[in-house]
Amino acid sequence: MAISSNKRPPTKKIVNEYATLSKAIEGLRAVDYKIALTIGSWDLLHIGHVRYLRLAKEYGDALVVGVDSDRGIKSYKGELRPVVPEHERAEMLSYLDCVDFITTIDDIDDQGRWQYELIKAIHPDVFIAVEDSYPQEQLAEIRKHCAEVIVLPRQAETTSTSKLIQGTIKKHLDEMYKLTEKRS
């Protein structure tokens, strides 16, 4: 069941006000839609991300995707990330048919702990996570706010954003070194 229309621009799927998103979710629930939620950084969107989102959509009639803010990603992945700014990551996700709503997550405290504001606002029927993304105590906290938690395996054997970045940098540095050696 797709809720998107070809007449609406895909970017209309981006709803950053949790109160507005909650109203949309209430409307979907009124017509018996099952709401699935997943959250991630979605930096340098790759095949594993797209496979995962398509699979996550199978667990609900509407898929809400949380996009970690630039500030949040920097707090847990370091100052060099994200590569792609949050508004562009959200827009990229809006073009995927399996994604019904996108919203930015920026509710981490000073210690970098997530405060679950999105989950509390929309109370998804199902929360979809990737294995090893959340410690057990965090999954227990998530379970307090939704009916079911599904943990999926990673959907790409060799591709990850970190590996893409490292591989690209290594190739460029190797090539630069070779060019420097030729000039010497």
Image (cartoon, rainbow, N blue to C red):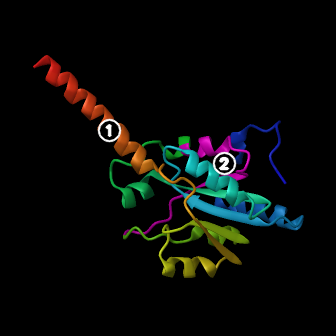
Residue 26: x and y in percent read 80, 65
Q: What span is in magenta?
A: 89-110
Q: Is residue 119 left or right of residue 68?
A: right
Where is mark 2, residue-wise? 14
Query: Does the image show residue 117?
Result: yes
Q: Dot 2: few (<14), some (14–19), or many (≥20) neighbours within 10 Å?
A: many
Residue visible at 65% across and 61% down in the picture: 18
- Disc tally is 2
Residue visible at 72% across and 58% down in the picture: 57
Q: Secondary structure at mark 2?
A: loop
What amino acid type is highlighted by mark number 2?
Ile
Residue 181 image label: none
Quadrant where the image shows the C terminus: top left
Looking at the image, is 70 positioned above or below residue 107?
A: above
Residue visible at 79% across and 39% down in the picture: 8
Residue 110: x and y in percent read 38, 68
Looking at the image, is 182 positioned above or below residue 147?
A: above
Q: CA distance from mark 2 to mark 1?
A: 32 Å
Looking at the image, is 59 positioned above or below residue 91?
A: below
Residue 127: x and y in percent read 65, 69
Q: Secondary structure at mark 1?
A: helix
Q: Is residue 21 left or right of residue 66?
A: right
Where is mark 1, residue-wise? 169
- 139 or 152, which lies in front? 152
What amino acid type is highlighted by mark number 1?
Ile
Q: Is residue 24 left or right of residue 71?
A: right
Looking at the image, is 101 positioned above or below residue 144?
A: above
Assess whether residue 129 is covered by the magenta stretch.
no
Query: Does the image show residue 20?
Result: no
Q: Earlier in the sequence, mark 2 or mark 1?
A: 2
Assess whether residue 93 is covered by the magenta stretch.
yes
